[in-house]
Amino acid sequence: MSAETQTPAPGITFTKQDGEAALAVLASLGNPEYGLPTLTDEEIVALDGINHPQAVALPWLDTHRSQLELVCNVALRTLLSKGLVFPVSVNSETAPSRLGAIEPITGVMALRRLSQRVVIAELTKSGDEKVWLYTYCHDETALQELVDSSGTHAFSVCRVSDAGRVIMELANAAGISSADGPAEVLTAEQFEAKATREFDDVRGVTIITAIGAGQGEADHYTLYTSSDALHGLEATEENGEARLQVVQVSSDTALAKVGAVVSGAGA
């Protein structure tokens, strides 16, 4: 985590303690005894502050927006009762002026806001069930936040070089090997016709998007997973008009494409 690349969200101030906790979380890579938290939508928002916008999916909280303040207060009450969050007095103050949290929670909440590059993998399964995996890159180590459709956020740490593999485990959970095939360049209408004709047994569609601090445009790659094949989709431009390049890919090729998006080398 390099100071010159940190881009905290507007209105959020990070302390030295936040930075130390963030570094401790990154240093926990390979240490199974360092317990990273699993938090809910409302706990995430309560810890971050209800007035701060969230860049992650909040599927449960989105259905309870009318009760946002109430559910977040209940979430804080639960965290306090478990000793995961506690009142903090600053300097010589006699009364607590803010809330603190245990190191793993403090660390992950800071790392989510201070990443050099964020990679978002959104998986839509058959039946429109969704899962999201957010990868926050910090030099050679990444914090990952897995969000399921019930609004549970599970955190883990991996090497940035392994992040593409973790994304592929989500996108291709069945471990389909597939095979490389020729590419087709299609218009949007042609692709829709092809998808209707050939992708009728698609089990999942994973849209992978990555953007770095100061980067103007995002990198994209989409992976379609059917019962026996993988198909990659990339947007291109031909004579000033958008074109979609679709190609059947092997799992190794798909992994290389995803890895390129993670690293910023482009799919």
Image (cartoon, rainbow, N blue to C red):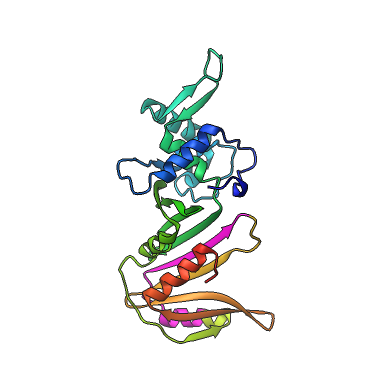
Would you say residue 93 is visible in this rendering?
yes
Would residue 164 be counted in the magenta stretch? no
In the rendered image, residue 64, in percent from the top left (x then y), is placed at 48, 42
**Which residue lies at the image location 36% right of the left edge and 78% below the top edge?**
229
- Please provide percent x and percent y for residue 193: 50, 82
Query: Which residue is at the far top?
Result: 94
Q: Evaluate whether residue 44 shows in this view.
A: no
Q: Residue at x 59, y 46 (%)?
A: 6
Q: What residue sits 50% from the left and 58% below the top?
A: 120
Q: Quadrant of residue 266?
A: bottom right
Say whether residue 178 is left or right of residue 52: left
Q: Is residue 198 magenta?
A: yes
Q: Quadrant of residue 212?
A: bottom right
In the image, residue 122 above or below residue 92: below
Residues drawn in magenta? 192-213
Viewer-side residue, 114 vs 200: 114
